[in-house]
Image: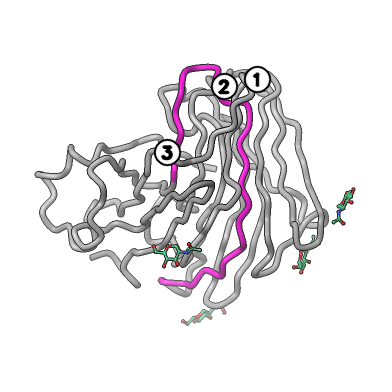
């Protein structure tokens, strides 16, 4: 999927942005990072650290904000989406899409810079309330496996992928991302709660998101905070707090 690695340090905009309607109300931590396409939690470490990431979550029912257009949010886990290693990202997730009141879920995998590829819907489908497991596992810096499981029916799809560009393995992230390039296509996904979230490293250490950097998704005009994220133990709770409709 289209991917932007543009991040803003919160402090950078603290004095230059005046109309912080929602953001003032929700009082970001000054340590939060703002992004125009991501919200969630990110672990960072030295190059060559992360070998896998996983989490479970329950499929929420997104609510359309701008019907009659399709709106999508993408829920994913990945390695190297957030760092100075912009050459490769190993990631897998599910698009939560809504057109008026019709909701669809589609599982996908990606080894950026190659684009996202949908898993075959004959192999795995989803319904509201399904428990899903996402995982990305590095084999070598240029190969890995992306796996999605529908726990409610014990069905797994898995794809081994290779790339010509190398992973750095220095970030691991649990993310909700705008489905498209513009904020107006983003639905109210209510809450996505990743549970059992962990990232493993080459030394065998398993890390929870406890010390993660929180990334707040903000609107392109920077006036509205769209997501807020709470990390507790192995849980990452990402909640939609954006305006119900339209750009402020
Ligand atoms: C979605 O709702 C709009 C009215 O809000 C209607 O015009 C349109 O036909 C609907 N689209 C579908 C696919 O149902
Ligand atoms: C996943 O599980 C749900 C039951 O919660 C079921 O409705 C759906 O069809 C399942 N998908 C597959 C591919 O089995
Ligand atoms: C899930 O499926 C796997 C094989 O695909 C099987 O080994 C396992 O026992 C199943 N678990 C449950 C709870 O049915
Ligand atoms: C997630 O966080 C929101 C507040 O941001 C809270 O209302 C909700 O209960 C939390 N859900 C879980 C499962 O922790």
Q: Who's the residue at 69% across and 68% down the image? A: 127
Q: Which residue is drawn at 44% across and 28% down?
A: 44
Above or below, 166 relative to 248: above
What residue does disc 3 label?
212
N-terminal of the pair, mark 3 or mark 2, is 2
Q: In the image, what residue occupies the spot 37% across and 44% down?
A: 215
Q: Pick whichever, 226 or 87, lies toward us.
A: 226
* Residue 123 position (above or below residue 198): below
Q: How far apart are marks 2 and 1 (CA)?
A: 6 Å
Mark 2 lies on residue? 167
**What x and y, as percent, mark residue 4?**
42, 38
* Location of residue 163 (image quadrant): top right
Check the picture and name the quadrant holding the C terminus. bottom left
Residue 18 coordinates in the image, percent (x, y):
10, 54
Segment tinted magenta in the rendering: 41-65
Q: Nearer the viewer, residue 210 or 126?
A: 210
* Disc 3 versus disc 2: nearer the observer: 3
Residue 56 belongs to magenta span: yes
N-terminal of the pair, mark 2 or mark 1, is: 1
| Local crowd size for mark 1, using a 10 Å CA cut-off: few (<14), some (14–19), many (≥20) | some
Q: Is mark 2 on a helix, strand or loop?
A: loop
Residue beneath the point at 42% across and 27% down:
83
Asked if residue 227 lies left or right of residue 89, the reply is left
Evaluate if marks 1 and 3 touch, with contact meaning CB atoms under 8 Å apart. no
CB atoms of marks 2 and 1 within 8 Å: yes
Residue 142's tag is 1
């Amino acid at each position: 999927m289209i991917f932007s690695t543009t991040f803003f340090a919160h402090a950078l905009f603290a004095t230059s942005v005046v109309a912080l309607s929602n953001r003032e109300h929700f009082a970001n931590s000054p340590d939060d990072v703002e992004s125009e396409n991501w919200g969630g939690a990110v672990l960072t470490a030295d190059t060559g650290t992360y070998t896998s990431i996983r989490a479970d979550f329950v499929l929420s029912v997104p609510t359309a904000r701008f019907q009659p257009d399709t709106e999508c949010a993408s829920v994913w886990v990945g390695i190297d989406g957030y760092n100075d290693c912009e050459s490769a990202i190993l990631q897998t997730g599910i698009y939560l899409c809504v057109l008026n009141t019709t909701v669809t879920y589609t599982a996908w995998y990606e080894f950026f810079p190659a684009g996202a590829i949908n898993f075959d819907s004959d192999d795995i489908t989803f319904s509201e309330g399904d428990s899903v497991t996402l995982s990305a596992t590095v084999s070598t810096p240029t190969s890995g496996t992306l796996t999605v499981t529908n726990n409610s029916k014990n069905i797994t799809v898995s794809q081994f992928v290779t790339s010509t560009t190398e992973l750095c393995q220095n970030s691991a992230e649990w993310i909700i991302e705008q489905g498209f390039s513009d904020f107006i296509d983003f639905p109210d996904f209510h809450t996505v709660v990743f549970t059992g979230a962990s990232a493993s490293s080459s030394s065998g250490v398993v890390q929870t998101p406890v010390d993660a950097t929180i990334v707040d998704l903000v609107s392109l005009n920077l006036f509205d905070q769209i997501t807020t994220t709470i990390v507790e133990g192995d849980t990452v709770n990402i909640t939609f707090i954006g305006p119900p409709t339209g750009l402020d």
